[in-house]
Image (spheres, helix red, strand yellow):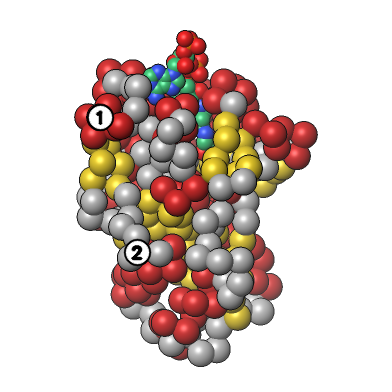
Amino acid sequence: MNAGILGLGRYLPDKIVTNADLEKIMDTSDEWIRTRTGIEERRIANDEINTSDMAYEAAKAALENAAISAEEIDLILVATVTPDQSFPTVACMIQEKLGAKKAAAMDVSAACAGFMYAMITAQQFIQTGAYKHVLIVGVEKLSRITNWEDRNTAVLFGDGAGAAVLGPVAEGKGILSFELGADGTGGQHLLQDGDFIHMNGREVFKFAVRQMGESSLSVLDKAGLTKEDVDLLVPHQANIRIMEASRERLGLPIEKMTKTVHKYGNTSSASIPIALVEEMEAGRVKDNDLIIMVGFGGGLTWGAIALRWGK
Ligand code: UT7
């Protein structure tokens, strides 16, 4: 049984924080942020909006898009490093809110690669026939663990949620191949220590450029495909320079890479599903398109998926 995407949804908070807004509260500039990261603005959730609220909205939208009811969901996986609390999990909270009565539920913690880990976990249950419909959400309220006095990190992140309903699809469609990986020896380069995110930007940058390229090529190879077959690259939206390096490694023209980093910043595990929803809504994903999704993050972790669009 092949597992594929039956529907997608997203939620972004209304509040926009521009680079100019950040210039007023820290020693930074719009010019620095744009040229080093490609980010122009990000969304920040108000105090009343928690991670589970954003997850719920994105999940509802994905169910609607898939035309699947909450009662038909067998498993809910929520990828997040900013849950409302450690337990009950965000997955359990949205299970209740959605009324997904028969669904098992758990959170998955793999930082910015979390959505890739959740998708592949879902795939295993669908492939074996154990479960039919799995709801997965990538969601972060990174603003809660952002140190607004640390310009090295504060300019990079944003809040948001993206969700997908996975289920059985026709032969030749859905997830064709994947790669997941971890290297705990690099854990100190990107972590939450105390209340805040800490990062060695240069080390993470080098790791990301190398890993995004290698993982993308690896999933193509595993699927028996080549760079020429790729219709769309959906990289983790961390930094336009990292994304560009991956695109060049695959030799793709600029229009074959998704870009939302300029308007949402880095939303960690939410960035890949949000980017994919926007491609779908813009009508840029066609039946049988070959999509490469690739992410990296704290842990260190990484993950890539080759997916043939369609049911
Ligand atoms: O989801 C995974 C999350 N992490 C990432 O994706 C991060 C990967 N790394 C990066 O994206 C880049 O390394 C950064 C955007 C974080 C930094 O870019 P960089 O080209 O590696 O800059 P740098 O760290 O080498 O810093 C250059 C300079 C430094 O000043 P000095 O020491 O050369 O005088 C920084 O202090 O830029 C300074 N700087 C800033 N200046 C203005 C650092 N942050 C800022 C800032 N505004 N916000």
x, y percent for residue 252:
41, 27
Q: Quadrant of the C terminus?
A: bottom left
In the depicted structure, whether residue 66 falls above or below residue 300? below
Q: Quadrant of residue 120?
A: bottom right
Respond yes or no on whether mark 2 lies under 8 Å from ligand 1: no
Q: Residue at x 57, y 35 (%)?
A: 198
Q: Secondary structure at mark 1?
A: helix
Camera-nearest residue between 184 and 44 = 44
Query: Dot 2 surroundings within 10 Å: few (below 14), some, or many (20 or more)?
Result: few
Closer to the eye: label 2 or 1: 1
Query: Does 149 sit above or below residue 13?
Result: above
Residue kind at label 1, given as amino acid type: Lys
Classify mark 1 as within 8 Å of ligand 1 or not, answering yes or no.
no
Residue under pointer 1 = 24
**Which mark is first along the chain, 1 or 2?**
1
Q: Observer-nearest residue: 139 or 196?
A: 196
